[in-house]
Image (tube, rainbow, N blue to C red):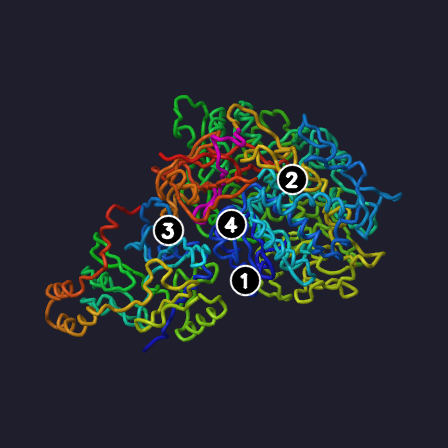
Amino acid sequence: MTNHYIDLKNSDVILIMGSNAAENHPIAFKWIMRAKDAGARVIHVDPRYTRTSARCDYHVPIRSGTDIAFLGGMINYIIEGNKFFRDYVVNYTNASFLVNPDFSFKDGLFSGYDAKKRTYNKDTWTFQKDENGVPLKDPTLKHPQCVFQLLKRHYSRYTLDKVSSITGVSKENLLKVYEEYSATGAPDKAGTECYALGWTHHTSGSQNIRTMAIIQLLLGNMGIAGGGINALRGEPNVQGSTDHCILYGNLPGYLKMPNASLAKLEEYLKKNTPTSNDPQSANYYQNYPNFFVSWLKSLYGDAATPENGFGYSWLPKLDDGKHYSQLHLFDRMYEGGIKGLFAHGTDPAVSSPNTNKTRKALEKLDWLVCANIFDNETASFWFGPGVDPKQIKTEVFLLPAAATMEKEGSQSNSGRWVQWKYKAATPPGDAISCGDIQIRMMDAIKALYAKEGGPNAESILNLKWDYKDRQGNMDVLKVAKQINGHWEADVEVVDAGEKKLFKKGGLVPTFGMLRSDGSTSCGNWIMSGSFGADGENKMARRGKDDPTGLGLYPNWSFAWPVNRRIIYNRASCDIYGRPYNPKRKLLEWTGEKWVGDVPDGPWPPMADKEKGKYPFIMKSDGVASLFGPAMAEGPFPEHYEPLEGPLAKNPLSSQLINPTIEIFSSDLDQVANASEKFPYVCTTYSCTEHWCSGALTRWQAWLLEMQPELYVEIGEELARELEIANGSKVKVSSARGEAKCIAMVTKRFRPFTIEGRTVHQVGLPFNYGWLYPEDGSDSTNFLTPSVGDANTFCPEYKAFMVNVTRI
Amino acid sequence: MKKTEYIKLIDTTRCTACRGCQVACKQWNEMPASRTRNFGSYQNPPDLQWNTWTLIRFQEYADKNGDFKWLFRKDGCMHCTEAACIKVCPSGALYHTDYGTVALNRSACIGCKACVSACPFDIPRYNQATDKIYKCDLCYTRLHEGQKPACVLSCPTGAITIGEKKAMIEAAYNRVDKLDGKATVYGDKFVGGTHVMYILSENPAAYDKLPSNPKVPASVILWKNLFKPFTLIGMGAVAGMAALHYLIKGPHEVHEKKEGGEHDV
């Protein structure tokens, strides 16, 4: 979240799209209801009428996988209707920047496309610069090559007729949402967006979110109370996991995993440290070397020295051009290229797409180590349905793990609040925390390497690994302090004109003091400051004071970065630092300092040409990106059909599907696009009563009682056509597999009219597996394809094609 | 000493049907789950049971204009002031607490099922295995300790609240004033007023299994005034039961049949 849960109450219009907030984030809905009580409008755009829709002002049905078309139409409406917040757009975005004249967009492709590699050469996705290397701008936004005009041209193709025909949303409904939401472009109005897996689970996932980011920037909704783009993340500590680099391309704090071609530290730092020649751009990532070297110091301790590049060469590297997502992992495993797998706190035999492929891939392993609080379908794959245990060579270990309430530590919510929690109960039997499992395992591995040596032994033997208490168990406070960071030498720092001496071994107060000379260590720079230099665990703070009245609660837990509750908050004020909305004063420049939330840097507002800085300090140009060249698919989001859809042709261009997604080609990666055999659009989701693959909740009798088995929701019209009775057994099948389940015939799915013909959509929850309940159902993911977003490889669970038959 | 009379207010316009209340109720009252099947609805168990004292009813409803609504109603004991169940209970197991709520002393229950037939809201459920009646007692033990009932505590959106009678009735009407025209307050106009009230977004008639004008059955009034005093004094339970069955054999079904195939998990 750019904002945080409580801040939802400050909104005037809440667009819930790509999320079933009431069912999957019930507590978030508390704050949405508060907004509603205060007069906010709440809109739900979703393929299915859900428990969320029931509590919104209205629900707008949309065909799965067409969000960019819907939102692109809104961009067009905002620009054509002059509904955008001009002051904000001119000053705080790159709308005025002049783009390279060689940049182009034709028939669904941007300049630089390499069809063979399915990637772009981004050389033309750049700005024109002056003699000092500063981007050229036209603040009137009239120059034909400025970002604003290119944006306008790009989305002029997203007419109401076109968008309605693609999405299946009536023109009346499109206009209703566009009009209501774009009204938040007024300086004293706030609109927010809540999304979740309904946006990320697409081959266009990242671009779905970016399209909304463009809308929020056009309307001046970023950096303000009641605004922002708000990913509702889950109870599995998704926020904490990503902050601490669960994704293969990241290191802690979203630092970049190095590539093999960057052999030396200097090369790596040069590649990843952005530069700006604009004196008013803070370009905060110029501090990248401080964050990265401090992280290396936390990893290798005293062994990391300037002479050995702080151990950079010991880090594993990604092969250039190769990806290591879960999709790639299972593809490679299926090919026989992976020998062993650790599956801790995960149940891929249910949760990964294309279950037939996933389970076959597990059979290719020599060994599999699972750690979980219950047995699950992954640990038990070797005796699953249709599997002959005698034919399985994989040796499987299942380690009993402690549940979340059985251990102390931090948990991060979507609002970036890192909240400390205590152990409530002792884990049963031999169960220990996953941290302890890893510590014991790494101790054994280190001992083995010390004794026998082996490839890359240095990277293991030099690992600093002092996270144990006197009993030899994991000491979470030691881990937390290392994440915050230590001084590795006595250092004198001039802070606010005052000389301060910091002693070796003390805690670093904030990431602004991290250094690239080896005198600091920090396990995760964005978390620096979470443990006070005086030893106060700020994550454990529970102060309930609310000085701004906006629900920021600055003394409750720690929010990264530097306890900032709403990021980009300097954009809530005009260029002189006066709040755009005096009723919701998030921040204000007094002439000497910022008052309110923790500002994005101490500098004066940008009207001060000497000392002032632009508000988006993490962007190298200091402003937000309407034109976003970092994306794989292009700097402007474009609608492409899902890998599997009902259409043989994309109504907007000759590019049917996202031109940059990777297509997997094993014999089990079957695709049936626009096929008569699989005529219905299908989507998958979770329900309130279960959690993820259900590996934890299916064992809970009270929850299972409420949602006992797999069902498919089918609209009444389609059920009539197929003569399917409510509550009867049916088979849902795709080109990859099938799922037997109960038909839930409902008014909540309605047929769409797409390109002039009727298209039905159905949907299933993904919370079931064969292991338990015993007479229940198996994974929904037998149906889903192994394909993912081109930037993140997040699988496309939300849009594919199926058939439904009676059994 | 008469304690504060409480009302639990269920605002259906704030309910997201997350069913936290349904689980919290089972947890606090230590009621087991049943092994259910999906019968084509989110609603599960399909109905109240001896081990399910509160249940969210899910109802797909189109109003007169064809506007679709998904209605959620938390069903459970209404805790009537003129409580038919108490009037017919020959053993005194059912009684009014000092909070105005209807509690059940299960050890005194003789399993006669008179309350099952008498309840205008179809709430009490009979368990064959124990030969006893079960229903919500509005978490009497929690109220006694100054705690909110489990369902109230679990509700994330504030759809279930509890408070002093007068204030809650006032709150209900204030809320309805802010909602659109069809919204109504339900519970204060019949059976002497109930201690569970609803804010309904639709007319009461729109809701499944919710009587628009619930009444204590005439037969129950007759029973109470003519016969019950004698049963308590000297008629004996057997004769009393026979008289009662004769009097109130009405439209209500006893539910043991529905629960027949289920077992505890």
Q: Amino acid at mark 4?
A: Asn
Circle 1 SS class = helix
Magenta stretch: includes residue B257? no
Q: Which residue is mark 2?
A: A251
Chain ID for label 4? A
Q: Which residue is mark 3?
A: B43
- Residue under disc 1 on the same chain as residue under disc 3: no
Q: Which residue is mark 4?
A: A20
Q: In the image, what residue occupies the spot 82% across and 45% down?
A: A135
Q: Residues within 10 Å of mark 2 (few under 14, many from 20)?
A: many
Q: Residues within 10 Å of mark 4 (few under 14, many from 20)?
A: many
Quadrant of the rendered structure where residue A179 is? bottom right
Seen from the viewer's position, the closer of residues A418 and A483 is A418
Q: Residues within 10 Å of mark 3 (few under 14, many from 20)?
A: many
Q: Is residue A484 above or below residue A802?
A: below
Seen from the viewer's position, the closer of residues A181 and A243 is A181
Circle 2 SS class = strand
Q: Tell me the distance, in whole angstroms, between the alpha carbons under discs 1 and 3.
A: 27 Å
* 2 or 1: mark nearer the eye: 1
Q: Is residue A476 visible?
A: no
Q: Tell me the distance, in whole angstroms, between the alpha carbons under discs 2 and 1.
A: 40 Å
- Which stretch is magenta? A671-692
Magenta stretch: includes residue A680? yes
Q: Position of residue A433 (x, y in %)?
A: 49, 43
Q: Amino acid at mark 2?
A: Leu
Quadrant of the rendered structure where residue A611 is? bottom right
* 2 or 3: mark nearer the eye: 3
